[in-house]
Amino acid sequence: MSEATPAAELQAARARARAMADDLGGAREFGPLLPGVNPPRWEVGHVGWFQEYWCLRRAGPGLHAVARHESILPNADALYNSATVPHDSRWSLPLPDFAATLRYRDEVLARVLEQALRSGEDIYFARLAARHEDMHAEAFHYTRHTLGYEAPAIADRPHPPGERAQGDVAVPGGVFELGSAPGAGFVFDNEKWAHPVIVAPFRISRTAVSNAEYLAFVEAGGAPPAHWRKAGGTWQQRRFDRWLPLAEDEPVIHVSWEQADAYCRHAGRRLPTEAEWEFAATWDPVSGRKRAFPWGDEPWQGSKANLDNATLASVHAYPEGDSALGLRQMIGNVWEWTSSDFLPYPGFLRDPYKEYSEPWFGNHKVLRGGCFTTSPRIARATYRNFFSRERSDVFAGLRTCALERG
């Protein structure tokens, strides 16, 4: 997706976040204390605080300036700085009420939009704040599912069908530039910079693992994903506040890395490394170069990938988004676990938001590709998501590789 103006990105991110979170007041402002979620009243305030901290409160020149002006909200740093406020304390902080929290968040955006947003620093931090809000909008989406709330009131675009995509694709391997290159637009520090790696030839499945494929593993004794149940001899899956028949052609979702690895071992397969994943997603053997997206260099359109949407699609949908090698849905629909640990690329230098990547190196696994609710501003072929291996609340599934390389 080509980058819109910073103001347009901020407004689009806010519209999505409002749809996900602004109806969670009242009895749902806090919800149960769980490790994978935040209380909505706190998280809404944190989104506003982050935008204010980076876009309005910088008191010195340079991307790495440390000095800060005071917040428009008293004691905001002690309430909303996720780097210093422990997760479990967020349910007991003296937070403003929900209506006041929404007003604070929206007042921050209004003040940011009043700025010219012309300097390189202003533009950088506006884009950072928009993407941070995109991430929290997605987090609100999976929080709603985790807690069994109704789905958010967002448009559900139709899913373009495709022929059944089956089997493996042979990937030739070779020297490959892993990561983002300078000039590619806004990227996060953990994507910097593209560097050569050698990828051995391998075979990878054309689609993500479907519910039907994973069900065979479950019925052979494997652990079912979160939010599955068997009722009256029939398998069902919970989608937000509704139990539905298991959709066999949808990708399996809500599996942890550990479950994904166990499925692979049962199937005699393995997870791809993140270098293999990015190679398969972007390499064009005809031109002999890396594409910006699986489908080419043109920006995302709704027919290319299931992003910024309300529901999952069949693993066979979106044929227009196929990679040059014939892989389907390398972007969108469901995040895909890789075998790779989340580690810095060579020469890593942290960006101003130092808590984004560095604290998590070595103790998280990399996921790639984005899911149905991910913002196109984030879902790029070089974007590295990362979660701890036990997390099953996120919209994550898997794609597999043959064990033998070459």
Image (cartoon, helix red, strand yellow):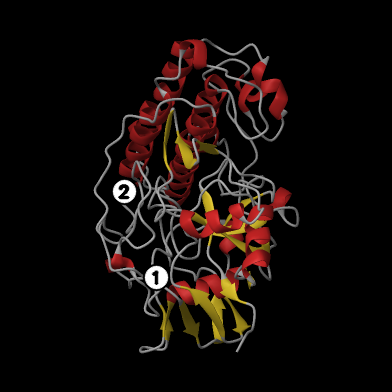
Q: Quarter holding the N terminus?
A: bottom left
Q: Position of residue 203 (x, y in %)?
A: 53, 80
Single out the residue that lies furthest toward the front: 233
Q: Nearer the viewer, mark 1 or mark 2?
A: 1
Residue at 39 percent of width and 56 percent of height: 249
- On residue 389, which mark appears? none
Question: Which quadrant of the figure has residue 80?
Answer: top right
Q: Nearer the viewer, residue 201 or 39?
A: 201
Question: Which quadrant of the figure has residue 107?
Answer: top left
Q: Position of residue 14 (x, y in %)?
A: 37, 33
Q: Nearer the viewer, residue 175 or 213?
A: 213
Which type of secondary structure does the marked residue at label 2 adopt?
loop
Q: Quarter holding the C terminus?
A: bottom right
Q: Which residue is mark 2?
A: 5
Q: Residues within 10 Å of mark 1 (few under 14, many from 20)?
A: some
Is 218 on the left-hand or right-hand side of 23?
right
Q: Which residue is mark 1?
A: 292
Q: Residues within 10 Å of mark 2 (few under 14, many from 20)?
A: few
Three-letter code for the amino acid on which mark 1 is drawn: Ala
Three-letter code for the amino acid on which mark 2 is drawn: Thr
